[in-house]
Amino acid sequence: MRLHFGVPDTQRAPVVLTIGNFDGVHRGHQAMLARLRAAGERLGLPTAVMSFEPHPREFFRPEDAPARLTSLREKAELLRSEGVDDLYVCHFNAAFAAQSPATFIDALLVQRLQVAWLLVGDDFRFGARRAGDFDLLAARGAQLGFEVEAQDTVVDGEDRISSSLIREMLANGDLEHATRLLGRPWHLSGRVAHGDKVGRTWGFPTANLPLRHRKVPVTGIFAARLTGADGVAHAGVASLGTRPAVKAAGLQLIETYLFDFDGDLYGQRVRVELLHKFRDETSFSSLDALRAQIAIDADNARHYFAALSG
């Protein structure tokens, strides 16, 4: 997949396109991408996704912006796995937000991207004051020679699958429900860094992924699965948060203790999937109490994976 920051002034060939934030690349998004692939095959054209950075809600109301389900890199990796040929990441700023719907269609979609077929969600709005909608796209498409289709909401039972609902399920600690809506376990990825090695002295060495300033939708202690550069998945127990039991005002990170593992992961880029939440983060009266609880958490995770395989 080719990653583009912005849209080039000239496009080498027409594309089939879908537009959205695609946070999480959940089952609703996957249904859209399946239709995109089908259109690309039917028309013999590359598939393209237009997304935005930052998320529009982060631009308009940064103090109320939701936690992202995926970083930009994670989203790009998931879109690549869904067969997308080109990802156009548009810088969402005041000038982009102020575009009229006509300019968005004529200048961006038609002149620069040469859109031949377009798929949008049934609630898609665009342009200044969100004045553009599906009806406008369809009318302009008929005039300018590109097809426009709408994607109906994808449901799971009574649930309308959405990034917002998945965030809610994660915040409630219902990882199994979130997994079903995503179509896979929710995960974080990053490069393993050196930590303070407190866990190692207690017999629980961890692979540490600093999250820096990333806002996450859930914290706590989890049954987890870590996959390294070799593609091998390892079961373990993970702590995601600020570690209040270890230090005050600590930086956010995810620490994963892997069962029966003695390799070196430092510097590797890994993926950590969270499968089941055991408890929230908490403080302890002493380091001995913390060490005892870590042993309980590890034992609970071992039982969880034994039940999965049994």
Image (cartoon, rainbow, N blue to C red):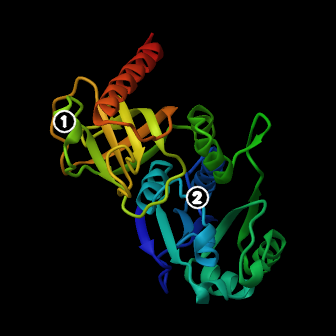
User: Residue 44: x and y, percent?
Assistant: 55, 59
Badge 2: residue crowd in 10 Å (few <14, some 14–19, many ≥20): many
Q: Where is residue 65, by image quadrant?
A: bottom right
Residue 22 is labelled as 2
Residue 127 left/right relative to 181: right
User: For the point 40% across and 65% down, which residue is it?
Assistant: 2
Number of marks in picture? 2
What quarter of the picture does the C terminus occupy? top left
User: Residue 45: x and y, percent?
Assistant: 55, 63
Residue 200 is labelled as 1
Q: Amino acid at mark 2?
A: Phe
Q: CA distance from mark 1 to mark 2?
A: 38 Å
Badge 1: residue crowd in 10 Å (few <14, some 14–19, many ≥20): few
Q: Where is residue 210, by image quadrant?
A: bottom left
Q: Nearer the viewer, residue 243 or 91?
A: 243
Which structural element holds mark 2? loop
Q: Amino acid at mark 1?
A: Arg
Residue 66 left/right relative to 162: left
User: Residue 135: x and y, percent?
Assistant: 84, 71
